[in-house]
Amino acid sequence: MTEWLGPQEWAAVGLSLKVAFWAMLGAVLPGVFVAYALARWDFFGKQFVNVLVHLPLVLPPVATGYLLLVTFGTQGFIGSALKEIGVVFAFRWTGAALAAAVMAFPLLVRSIRLSIEATDPKLEQAAATLGASRLWVFATVTLPLMLPGLLAGMVLAFAKAMGEFGATITFVSNIPGQTRTLPSAIYAFLQVPGGETAAMRLVVVSIIVAAGALILSEVLARRIAKKVGQV
Amino acid sequence: MSVEVQIRQNFQGFDLDVGFEAPSGLTVLFGSSGSGKTSVINAVAGLSKPAQSRIVVNDAVLSDSAAGVWVPTHQRSLGYVFQEGRLFPHMNVRKNLLYGNGLAKTRPEIASFVQVVDILGIGTLLHRRPSELSGGEKQRVAIGRALLARSKLILADEPLAALDEPRKAEILPYFERLRDEFSLPILYVTHSIAEVARLATTVVALKDGKVDRVGPAAEVLSDPSFTPMGPRAVGAVLDATVMRHHEDGLTELSANGVALMLPQLSHSVGDQVRVRVAAHDVILSREAPKGLSALNIVEGRVHSVRSGDGPGAIVSVDTKAGRILARITRRSAAALELSEGVTCYAVIKSVSVAPQDIGAR
């Protein structure tokens, strides 16, 4: 296997998996929170939040990447503050994860929101009448019932994060071993003469990872749906 | 033990102004749809917050808008049986039953898990999912779940409305047992006069967001001017004891010493039952009738004659068995010279008392 992919290529694959995993994990909690708020609460500025969340989906990725650079770069107003406490996003793999998380966020929120809206609020009411606090209702009723949607959203977010290119390259550039993710590596290989075979190998890896993720989510979703009793 | 409710609210042009006090037992909130009964029960549950309210259950103040008190739903110590059951689909019956039980460990249990399972006959269902239960089974589990939540008040919002007649007949006895075996106040919403007759200790009749009548069931139902579902649905309720089962398929009841014959009942001898006698099934006679096929003839005195706009009149007759209502024509009332204090005989066709209108008391 090691002969099939060169060390640079392996580095790109490993980095992409790492970036996508942390992007997905980091986006999940805020994703659930925002999705729940959009699905169940009425609050001032709800439309604004909704638009803001979906913006990365419709904006050119390069624009999103540039905005990230402006805000989270070392000169950016959040980036410079974070630098003080030792957190740096610019030109690091963490920055690639942030860009991937932001790009995957709308897909995650949409999927979770749909699954929350599909769970009957009357069941949550019933749980409350039986003595469950809001948090307990969420943990024991809402969360188990929305689990298939949450899982689907997470897989979607992971896949999106694996494939993120535009925002990533704009925000954190294309540094081998640091920010050169799978798509960036494919792009880089295509820029040099004779790089087509290496690029093709990485495309095959992309296909395997993406298909694997889809199959995994399908299997898990089916297992959960069976457990939840909504087959 | 009592329930005190005061609710005032104006919601989208609908004025709700309801106030009543009910003693212990089962209080039925009765009215047609749009009368405000669900708004009342949801305010008691804390699921909706009226502009003004004062709700007290057995000295526990659940809401007092004047004092700024509003206890959130999950702290009200309720057991709520919804029309659609609302069982948790991702939990089996056992977990559904115990959901509220584990959340209120500090309150005493009303009944043990084993007792509840036994009373409701759901022992064989414990490992099933709600999706594998019939409508009647779901409601039995819902009742059990409400009981096991160590509740201080049971609420039920049309718990039988989604069931067919045989299933209704299956579930009704459980509410009777709930009323009779546990000293819990129960608030029960329905638009069915048969359920009122069978279950209610106290009736709170609502109409257009206001209280129309409040009182003991027998009193409210035998009031000839109380015709919420039209004159055809009028009927009095008699309390009786099962005396014996005759070989020819009839059951003999005694209502305060007056013998009543009914088609065979499943109740045992000595059981207390409630019998609803629909007003349109009662014939009145000024003289003791002879040679009549009807088996139940009860002597009494006319209490009042109430004529409506149509050709009908409702005559209430005080008998030793209790007050009986008869729906006759105004013409007959005039011909028989029925007026207050006149002696007359109420003829009840024994077959006319429908089984679903007979309940354990």
Image (cartoon, rainbow, N blue to C red):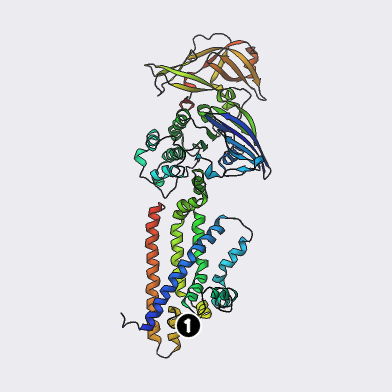
Q: Secondary structure at mark 1?
A: loop
Q: Is residue B181 above or below residue B14?
A: above
Residue A77 is left or right of residue A184, and the answer is right
Q: Is residue B143 above or below residue A216?
A: above
> Can you give x and y, in whole percent of width and height, for residue A170 in the image?
53, 80
Quadrant position of the N terminus of chain A in the picture = bottom left
Which residue, given by chain and number where applicable, does mark 1 sit on?
A174
Specify the quadrant of the image occupied by residue A34: bottom right
- Looking at this view, is B116 or B1 the one in front? B1
Can residue A58 be seen here? The reply is: yes
Can residue A231 be seen here? The reply is: no
Q: Amino acid at mark 1?
A: Asn
Specify the quadrant of the image occupied by residue A13: bottom left
Residue B218 is left or right of residue A200, and the answer is right
- Looking at this view, is A83 or B233 the one in front? A83
> Can you give x and y, in whole percent of width and height, for residue A2 in the image?
31, 81
> Can you give x and y, in whole percent of width and height, for residue B104 in the image?
46, 42
Q: Give the residue displayed 41% in from the left and 79% down from the top.
A: A12
Mark 1 burial class by Cα count in 10 Å: few <14, some 14-19, many 20+:
many
Q: Give the residue displayed 45% in from the left and 51% down from the top.
A: A140
Task: Name the outermost residue toward the bottom.
Answer: A193
- Looking at this view, is B296 or B217 the one in front? B217
